[in-house]
Amino acid sequence: MEVDRREVPLYGQVEASVSLETVAPEAAEFYVVVRGSTLTHVTTAKRDTDGLSLRFTVPGHALSEVAAVTSYYCSQGQVQLCQGETSLEYRRDVAQEVAECLSAAREQLGPRSYWEALKRFSTSTAGEALGTGRFGCSEVDAQLGSSAEAELRHLDEKITYAVANLDYPRQWKNTDSRPREEAC
């Protein structure tokens, strides 16, 4: 069994496929298990149009590490291993670094914090334009070309995934001890 990507961002949320080397019934349900040192993820998979591979969304993970990937199918109440095991490596990227920076500085965040983080971490064309410090938020959209704007929007989406994958701050986890209004 092989996976079509060797590296994925720590926050996951990218499409991947694994080869399907076992003949499975048409009505089978497919699952992919991604197992790391501290977490195991089970996610659904769909047979690709070619019938020879399974497509799945890689789940986010807690650590930068190599994780084992196995696929299974379920048919008539029986779970069967599709075949073999492969691996993929979870890695940190710019979006992960920005998310961690924003999370660490959450007490000091202001309206321009996002732009400051982009200036610090981004190596894209959009990031270079932001790094000049002469544009405001609304001016950036007007000054950047459509491809740079699309690149910035894509980076924003990746940062959102990375923030969503981070552990919640301790005070968010124990909201039952405080009134609802204060927890927000």
Image: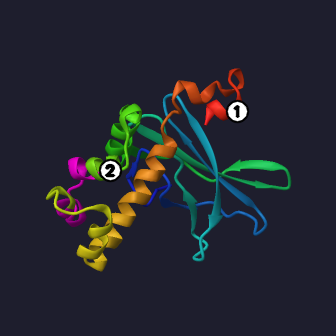
The residue carrying pointer 1 sits among few (fewer than 14), some (14 to 19) or many (20 or more) residues within 10 Å by Cα, namely few
The amino acid type, in three-letter code, at marker 1 is Arg
Using the image, determine if residue 57 lies above or below residue 169. Answer: below
Mark 1, secondary structure of its residue: helix
Residue at 46 percent across and 44 percent down: it is: 163
Question: Foreground residue, 182 or 40?
Answer: 182
Specify the segment rendered in magenta.
118-129
As displayed, is residue 175 above or below residue 40? above
Q: Which residue occupies 59% across, 41% down?
A: 41
Front-lying residue, 16 or 86: 16
The answer to whether one can see residue 172 in this image is yes
95 with respect to 72 (left or right): left
Query: Is residue 127 found inside the magenta-colored segment of the image?
Result: yes
The residue at the point 18 percent across, 64 percent down is 129
Tag shown at residue 180: 1
Q: Residue at x 25, y 78 (%)?
A: 145
Toward the top, the furthest residue is 177
Q: How is the image coloured?
A: rainbow
Task: Kindly identify which residue carries mark 2.
Answer: 112
Q: Nearer the viewer, residue 147 or 15?
A: 147
Question: Is residue 89 within the magenta segment?
Answer: no
**Regarding mark 2 in the picture, which secondary structure is present there?**
loop
Q: Amino acid at mark 2?
A: Arg
Instruction: Say whether residue 92 is visible.
Output: no
Q: Main secondary structure of the magenta part?
A: helix
- As displayed, is residue 140 above or below residue 170? below
